[in-house]
Image (cartoon, grey):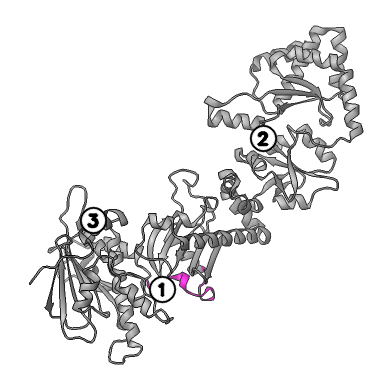
Amino acid sequence: MEKQQFKAESKRLLDLMINSIYTHREIFLREIISNASDAIDKLAYTALTDDKVGISRDQFAITITRDPDSRTLTVSDNGIGMSREELEENLGTIAKSGSLGFKQAMEKSEDIDIIGQFGVGFYSAFMVASSITVISRKYGEDTAWKWVSDGADGYTIEPTQKDAPGTDIIMTLKEDTEEEKYSEFLEEYEIRSLIRKYSDYIRYPIRMEVTKSRPVEREEGEEGEDKTPKYESYTEMETLNSMVPIWQRAKKDVTEEEYETFYRDKFFDYNKPLRIIHSSAEGSVSFKALLYVPGKAPYDFYTKEFKHGLQLYSSGVMIMENCEDLLPEHFRFVRGVVDSQDLSLNISREMLQHNRQLTIIARNIEKKIKSELKAMQENDREKYEQFYAAFGRQLKYGTVSNYGAHKEACQDLLLFYSHKQGKLISLKEYVDAMAEGQEKIYYVPGENKDRLAKLPQVETLAGKGYDVLLFTEDVDEFIPQTLMTYLEKSFCNASSEDLGLQTEEEKKQAEEKAEELKGFLTFVKESLGDQVKEVKLSANLGSHPVCMTPEAGMSFEMEKYMKRANPEFAFPVGRILELNPDHEAVRTLQRVMTEDPVKAKDYAQLLCYQAQLMAELPLEDPFAYTELVCKLIN
């Protein structure tokens, strides 16, 4: 028996395939089972026009046999089988695809769907096997053939005996090393786990002889003092896969309980999902998707350790457990599966990143998730707010990340607390409810919405009937800077920017008033020294005497954030003390300035402390503030 050499530089290709195309050894079983499924598909297709096949669809099966003593793992099918020529063609040349050729020949038929491409996938078995024996008998032929290879020095083919058409793939596993325990692939639990993970939805039963135990009655006189039950072991063939993916069924045929059970079992989340998205698409790329919006964020959701992405399948066979390319970062909370027959089973993670079909699928999924979330926001607000409490921050991050590249997908889904309405509202709801004459979307950033509601500027705007959004998360303040406008309305930080409320006449009067009190403003600035960069009058303080506002460019909240996030590069924002010239306290300060300049400096310092506290700014010397209050009381 002459040993034949692989074609097409197979030694080099085999090395590249093992070390580059596949990074997880465990997928070898997925590949071998997928090829077995292909072989059955071919015979099932043949049976449609050939009544001599003599086997019904419910008799087709894939059988796994493990023999720990001889270190062999066998995968058998009762499919179409291979002739000598096909063994040469399909297994003698790495990356030659028998299934692909069959699919191309049958491309006009809608009754056949080949999930694998025999060739590269088969050779993945050499990642765990020192040698592989293939025994195959083609349907319609009497002679069977045995193909044997150690994966390096070519292969041999010789005639052999086999009772019925089909193929046996017999893998002799490598010896264990300190780094790799190949014996695990002979363990019942490991095989069951791999089939559940990768091949659960192969359309034919995958069977294996498993060991079980059952109670037996003790013989008379055997029990004695021992009352514990007696068990005996036995073996039986068990089907390891469920065969029918839930996402392949019509929505009307799946109950809510089935959807939730699948979610719990697949993603280990015992909270009910808030939204179930079951969709399919036909066109240049066809796919089915079953997606879930969780009810709660996992404990590690906002950490680098969190693994996001959807499970990616090719016709029921899992290609990747966490395909990040299917989900944009702003929707990373979604769990689910995507299944497309247009994706090749033999495709690496690197290839997927540049796959045009995957890009089309991802774009469709993003649109679908957005529309479903929007529908929840509009039609089931209570549930949406529950979702937003868990994942709203992620939508905000998605809005501002990558310089706002995804703001169109996120901006309509954002919610902020409305001072006027006393609840969370969307930006569209804010604009729709804007008072007559209002031209800006007002917001104030801070740490606590109750404190923000008492700011002088908020009081002033409320007096005009204008609403103010209360921003209480670090990321909030970056959103107006990213969006710039929303429905043609510009944003205005009410705590630091011009509110735009004064008429031209009022502005002129304010300028005249400032000129009139120029000496007073200079006195206050000199009294406070470097504590403030400027002292000026303001018409936006309502019933309050003072407020502290930041110099243009960065807010106080941004300053605090920078100190926390990157203290080395943080710098203080210039403080501007604004005075209400109509408030009695400010008038008193003006009077005392001429009567007792020393006491007036104390009054100026007290108003500065008040402004700092109202702006939630830390006092550099709290003891000095306390002593000043006691001094003025005395």
For residue 244, which numbered disc appears in the image? 1
Mark 1 crowd level (few <14, some 14–19, many ≥20, 10 Å Cα): some
Q: Nearer the viewer, residue 521 or 617?
A: 521
User: Magenta residues?
Assistant: 242-256
Question: Going by the image, does 145 lie left or right of 384?
Answer: left
Q: How far across and how far down the image is residue 381, in percent?
A: 66, 57
Q: Which residue, given by chain and number where applicable, does mark 2 sit on?
A: 446
Q: Secondary structure at mark 2?
A: loop
* Amino acid residing under circle 1: Val
Q: Quadrant of the N terminus?
A: bottom left
> Is 404 above or below relative to 63?
above
Question: Judging from the image, what secondary structure is the residue with disc 1 in?
Answer: loop
Asked if the magenta segment contains residue 262, the reply would be no
Q: Residue 533 shows which numbered tag?
A: none
> Which residue is pictured at 48% across the width and 68% down the height?
287
- Determine the image quadrant of residue 401: top right
Q: Mark 2 belongs to which amino acid?
A: Gly
* Circle 3 SS class: helix
Cα separation between marks 1 and 2: 53 Å
Kind of residue sitting beneath label 3: Asp
x%, y% of residue 493?
72, 37
The mark that comes first in sequence, 1 or 2, is 1
The disc placed on residue 15 is 3
Q: Is residue 309 above or below residue 624?
A: below
* 86 left or right of 240 in image: left
Q: Quadrant of the C terminus?
A: top right
Residue 292 visible to an observer of this rendering? yes
Say which quarter of the image contains residue 474: top right
Q: Residue at x 20, y 83 (%)?
A: 164
In-image side of 178 versus 114 (left or right): left
